Amino acid sequence: MKVNTRFVVGSLMIAVLSACSSSPTERRQAKQDFKYLETPPLKEWQQPAEAKPEFYPQYDIPKGEYVGGIGKDVDIRPPQQVLELIPGARIEELKGEVTVWLVKKEDVDKLWQTVLTLIEKRDIGLITQNDSELETNWLKWNSEDEDHEFGARYKIVKLKQNNSFGFQISLIDWQVDGKTMDVTQANKARYNILMTNLVTSAYDEQLREEARIRAEELVKRIPISMGLDRSGLPIIIARAPYNIFWERLGELLPMMGLTIEDRNRSQGTIEVKYKEPDDEFWEEIGTKPLSFEGRTYNLLLGDLGNRTSINVTDAGGKPVDEATLDSVVPVLAAMIEKSNKMPKEEKSEE
């Protein structure tokens, strides 16, 4: 197992605004000079004896001791923000540490599994690990905004508090160019958030992949049948949402001998030209040929929520008869079944 894992900050899905400059130092610093640091200290205001002073408290400078950089030590880069990629998550940032809270335990368990998968995928070394806590080895961070290579070790812990479940990422050790030293509060917050975003991005990628697989399965199973519209006229019904069926129909029509000449998604119209396939085609799919007599037809799709309606008209805009419409149903169903069995390469060629 590798001891060090390197990350290029720019490769993460993180929005960072940086000025166009020639060096990392200039990217972090203001362009103006720092002559304001030479400003002489304020003196007590001396008023003439006959003057009557007026004070406006809204301009009072609050009293207190403020800790922070000045001059060249002021980092002008915008602070890092945790990417809100986990549905229903509540982000808590305190003293540079980041905690992600979720309502359901199973969501945290899934997120924890994402952490373990990420660690394995990126070959991140672990020093300790159990069911609810792990401690990483050194990770190396490289950024075009920094003059040095930073190293960090993290502790990631699963949490439970009242009815909430979460996990916390804490930066526990810090290196600058390979030398261990104390981390500044700014760097602790910045690189804790970077690590959190690495996890949330991986979780989001996993959710997207799962959604893609579910969508593919949904697209595969589209029952086709005859039905009636509100006026009692016959229509074809595809039991799939409009946006899904619209994409799928563009793939199926050419397989039926219908060449797409024009289409408008917002209006739900598709203009096609028909060239009847040979007898071998109809024998292969096991249906009767389409009862089309003309060359040009128009399909009109309607959004019925979880279903899609299909009307067919001839070149003159006249609806085809019920027998012609009925002949489309088994052919369209056979094309869906055939398409499901075809490799992706063949589909793209079609």
Image (cartoon, grey):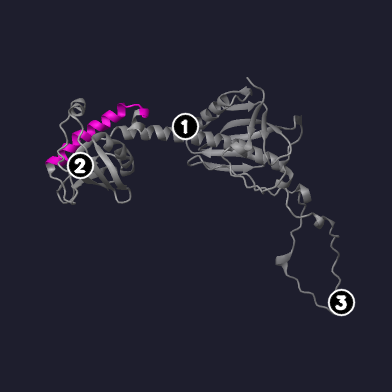
Q: From this view, report whether residue 274 is shown above or below residue 278.
A: below
Local SS, label 3: loop
Quickly name the residue at label 2: 236
Residue 137, given in percent of the width and then of the height, sits at 66, 26
Instruction: Tell me the quarter of the picture where residue 141 sits.
Output: top right
Coordinates of residue 113 in the picture (x, y in percent): 51, 28
Relative to 123, residue 324 above or below: below
Q: Nearer the viewer, residue 21 or 57?
A: 21
Q: Quadrant of the C terminus?
A: top left
Identify which residue is drawn at 37% across, 28% down.
345
Q: Which residues are magenta?
A: 323-345
Picture residue at 69% right of the left edge, 32% below the top: 172
Q: Can residue 344 be found in the magenta stretch?
A: yes
Q: How many marks?
A: 3
The amino acid on which the numbered mark 3 sits, given as a three-letter code, is: Pro
Identify the residue shown where x is 23% and y is 42%.
273
